[in-house]
């Protein structure tokens, strides 16, 4: 994807129902003898002996237990849990781990760094003449724009949502009527970077996540541009049959007023990525074969390995990461 354009979203539908990856890949193989699924069994750390991962510690039926591994261990716990498990296992920034009483077994300072996410602005709102029936998932069209022709990739997205999608701040300030709909600007190539850190050495304590959303001025600028694109589309002649009035922001904003509207409406796409980035350099958390640097028999297959977040929804990319992992294991 290198240019501008709109289209219907690709969706995974089977028998009229939206599918998830567990239904697509896991459920069909649960009857196989070499597959065991343990539910309500959170992993607390990877057990490391010397330079080798030999098992995982988890909590089952309220008791701490260890499951040994005679081959490889694959972490696929997601944007925040994967770095948390690594750090609880002693893989991370040695100085930061020391502050919570954990001795670093592998000093990997970039674990929990480089965290990225897509931003969805909620939102540019418009009142429809009357109530209308929602179709499919109520959000079926999206588009991508380059706000600067010199950019390698589109930096913003536009998503049409058939409900008055708004952040808590925007909803309180503008009080959109129930017949409102949204045309949401989004930022897909963020420059802001966040962190995931341990609160303590207790696995039950959730990690401290500081996404640093919109901390880079270019991100505020890009999201501001997406808002103007959304307004120009919704207020165009082609959309007049669907718009009684523009609810939010209600007028063209500039300067600090526009920047505040951007910040007030910023919400997450829940596409966290990058906390255990892949790379060829010595500081990378994993190598090109998804192996955790500094420890044998441990790999990662989830969104955390992305050096730079993809400019599209992360789910299909994560599926490809999983397929690539399967190829590497069978090689």
Image (cartoon, rainbow, N blue to C red):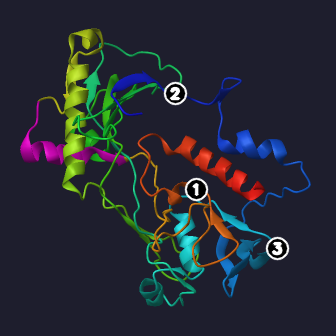
Disc 2 or 1, which lies upstream in sequence? 2
| Residue at position x 57%, y 48% in the image | 318
State how far apart marks 1 and 3 are (Cα).
22 Å
Magenta: main secondary structure equals helix
The residue wearing badge 2 is 137
Disc 1 or 3, which lies upstream in sequence? 3
Residue 204 visible in rendering:
no
Name the one closer to the observer, 162 or 152: 152
The residue wearing badge 3 is 70
State how far apart marks 3 and 2 are (Cα).
44 Å
Q: Which residues are magenta?
A: 252-267
* Category of crowding for the residue at label 3, using alpha-carbon neighbours closer than 10 angstroms: few (below 14), some (14–19), many (at least 20): few
Horizontal side, residue 273 vs residue 244: left or right: right
Q: Secondary structure at mark 1?
A: loop
* Category of crowding for the residue at label 1, using alpha-carbon neighbours closer than 10 angstroms: few (below 14), some (14–19), many (at least 20): many
The residue wearing badge 1 is 302
């Amino acid at each position: 994807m290198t240019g501008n354009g709109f289209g219907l979203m690709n969706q995974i539908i089977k028998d009229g129902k939206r599918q998830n990856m567990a239904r697509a890949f896991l459920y069909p193989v649960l009857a196989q003898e070499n597959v065991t699924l343990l539910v309500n069994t959170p992993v607390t750390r990877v057990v490391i002996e010397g330079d080798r991962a030999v098992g995982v510690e988890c909590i089952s039926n309220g008791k701490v237990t260890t499951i040994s591994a005679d081959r490889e261990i694959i972490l696929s716990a997601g944007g925040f849990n994967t770095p948390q498990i690594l750090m609880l296992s002693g893989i991370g920034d040695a100085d930061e781990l020391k502050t919570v009483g954990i001795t670093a077994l592998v000093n990997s300072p970039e674990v929990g760094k480089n965290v990225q996410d897509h931003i969805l602005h909620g939102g540019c709102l418009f009142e429809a003449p009357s109530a209308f029936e929602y179709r499919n998932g109520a959000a079926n069209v999206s588009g991508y724009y380059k706000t600067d022709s010199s950019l390698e990739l589109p930096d913003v997205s536009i998503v049409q949502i058939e409900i008055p999608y708004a952040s808590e701040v925007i909803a309180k300030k503008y009080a959109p009527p129930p017949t409102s709909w949204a045309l949401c600007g989004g930022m897909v190539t963020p420059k802001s970077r966040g962190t995931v850190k341990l609160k303590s050495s207790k696995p039950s304590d959730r990690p401290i996540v500081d996404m640093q959303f919109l901390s880079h001025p270019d991100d505020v600028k890009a999201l501001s541009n997406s808002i103007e694109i959304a307004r120009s589309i919704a207020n165009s002649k082609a959309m007049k049959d669907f718009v009684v009035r523009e609810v939010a922001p209600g007028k063209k904003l500039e300067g600090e007023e526009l920047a505040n509207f951007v910040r007030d409406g910023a919400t997450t796409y829940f596409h966290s990525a990058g906390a255990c980035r892949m790379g060829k350099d010595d500081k990378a958390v994993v190598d090109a074969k998804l192996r955790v640097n500094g420890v044998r028999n441990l790999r990662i297959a989830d969104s955390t390995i992305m050096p730079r977040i993809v400019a599209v929804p992360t789910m299909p990319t994560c599926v490809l990461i999983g397929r690539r992992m399967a190829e590497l294991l069978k090689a």
